[in-house]
Image: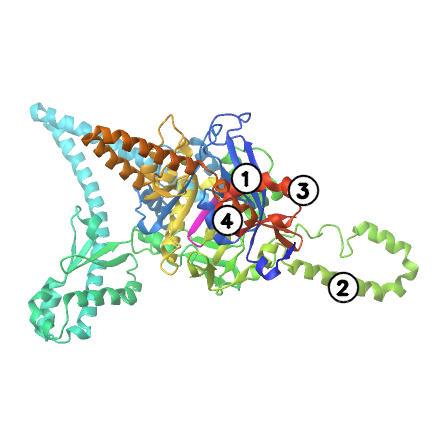
Amino acid sequence: MERLLMQSSLSKSSLIYPHGSYDSSCNYCDAGEDQKGRICYGMVADQLTCEDYQLLIDQGWRRSGTFIYKPNNSDKNTCCPQYTIRLDTSSFKPSKDNKSTIKKFNNYILNNIIKDNKKEKESTTNNNNAATNNNPTNNNTTNIKNNIDTQIKLENDGNNNNNNNNNNNNNNNNNNNNNNNNNNNNNNNNNNNNNNNNNNNNNNNKNNDETIIKLNNEIIETILNNGMVLIFNEQDKKILKENLKIKINSNKTIKETGSYSLSFGIFNRYRSKLNELSITIDQIIDYTILEFNKTIKNNNYNQFNLEKGQNNHINIKMDSLPQTLNGFTKTKTLNTQNSNKNLTTTATTTATATTTAKTDEPIHKFEISIHKPKCTDEVFSLYCKYQKIVHKEDDEKTKSGFKRFLIDSPLIPIIHPDESYDDYVNDGTDEDDNDGNENSNGKDDSIEDEEEDEEEEDEEEDDDEKEKEEKEKRKEKEDKKKEIKNHIYKIGQKSKTLKTRKFGEINTPKPGYGSFHQYYRLDGKLVGVGVIDILPECLSSVYFFYDPDYNFLSLGKYSALGEIEWVKKVSQSVPQLKYYYMGYYIHSCQKMKYKANYHPSQLLCPETFKWVDFKKAISFLQPNKKYSRFYFDENNSNQNNNNNNNNNNNNNNNNNNNNNNNNNNNNNENNERLTYFEKEPKLLDQVRFRQKNFTFHFSDVSVRFQNLLRDQVIDYINHVGPELTKELIFYFK
């Protein structure tokens, strides 16, 4: 019996077609193209809900265009097991490398300073020099880099002179006064240089001090204007002002208490007054923090966060990332504003010069905007340049291949109502339209001219008819351009919320859920593109490509930090969206090691699909052991420990207990080794199929058809699991 599925419910369903297991050459090791060390199970997704894809990636799946795949890590022929890695952004702690990346980027944006990197390859420098002919920014870049090289050389010479001076001083003490005089002159020069450096540092410290003093005054005014403390007279308020001072914390306590703290201990002097009105010091502290977040924070104090500390203190912490990056993400990488009613929402990043800038305005303009994925000439040419220079791929790239890889997506979009959906009407290319030498009738101009010559006698009679026909065809062509070319965007919708099975109804972040491209522009030039998926619980980074001429900015690392900051911001209004997925981690591949620099990250256990702390997970991966399970049932471990203790007390009972435990463990292991279908054979009839306009179940088809499908469907069940077996629809086109 065939059952009809209505179009309305189909738009909220995931349609997939399994291709089964396949092998291919590995790109992460030196096994060679002949060695098929990459074993995967793959499916093509015609359309996929964001929630279903979230479930898939939480079971080790990833997508490439509309093709979704899952590595078979346990296969003995797999050379490089791939483990899904993610970061809980709410606990993110920037590493030294992370901070260095941001500092380097900010120095360039604000002051056009490029940090010299001795490890930088000579080829990168050549690429930068080669780009100077067409890019005025690169002219400045090259000149500054040369100046820095010269400066470093001079500084090194100065250091050598200092060393010589010290040696000369020792000799001078014995018998040479002239050298002493020379050395004194050199030392005076060095002292002058040091004084200049100290002055610069003092200026920076002075700026910081001034900011803290202003913040201190604003907080005091907030406290004194609080209705709870109006009981104090002028003398009391004077005492409060003198004692409510922000203090710098010691280096030992900065991690816990932040850079600064403010003590409210002075209020203990007025405890009796406060008790009469049932006012506590905690209430005054809570009010202060609340008012700071509501009003003061927006007055150039975005870099500060106030937290309630111990012993009547407020801890004042600086943001985990430097102020300039916060300036970039203040409008936020993806938390963007509309522009001309397009989803081409632009977040212009204006780096304020109040922190480390030496100029009043940033020298470079850096922008991040978000778009629907589309293949423009600008994006495609950047992709080709990146693949050729960075990945050494010399084969000619095609737009169709690029589209399949990084444009096409099966994710059904849910767009925030404040964003414009108009951008989804056209995919941004006119490749399907005949705009070459063909006219509106679809004929070549030369052929058209010949036909007109032959029909010259009847031209006047047919003039009106042709004009009418051409007008209709032009209108038809314009209407065709306005059609939604990708059916994914036809079934998408605008909504403030998304209904999920796991969390119920959740908020929609800006710009929405689905697949997007982030454009990174430097002084108007496209220098990077980030391909991302926004899902109910995470931002999943799909791919990032950039202009190799800007290698010195570490745009790949910077984009990751920006995406982490976006997730942290969004999680305040969408609490479950707090994870940042970085794709796969391969322990044996050096190129993947950078993903471990984002702490604290987790790896997905390939057998239990439980998330395990990164350090704990990799402890199971030894040099000669590329694959391992990461998660083990603690109850079984505790039970084994208890039984081992009993063994020490009673050997006879031990033998019995060990036998029983071994039997239990064997049963558990055997149960775990069972496939999903072996554990739950009823899943076979819970698979939904679709062909044309009909959906049906396994039992609805003939026995012959069942025999043809059975093995393929069971394999599919064992790879997607019980929950997705019931949700996904097996689609026959």
Q: Look at mark 1 in the image and give the residue it sits on.
A: 715
- Which badge, 1 or 2, comes first in the chain's sequence? 2
Q: Left of 19 or right of it: where is 28?
A: left
- Which badge, 1 or 3, comes first in the chain's sequence? 3
| Local secondary structure at mark 1 | helix
Q: Position of residue 473 (x, y in %)?
A: 76, 61
Q: Nearer the viewer, mark 4 or mark 2?
A: 4
* Front residue of this view, candidates 410 and 379: 410
The residue at the far right in this view is 457
The amino acid sitting under disc 1 is: Asp
Q: Left of 118 or right of it: where is 449?
A: right
For marks 4 and 3, give the CA distance: 26 Å
Task: Please tell me which residue is depicted at 59% across the width and 34% down the height of the picture.
Answer: 395
Which numbered dot is residue 704?
3
Q: Quadrant of residue 276?
A: bottom left
| Local secondary structure at mark 4 | helix
Q: Look at mark 2 in the image and give the residue it sits on.
A: 472
Q: Which residues are magenta?
A: 536-543
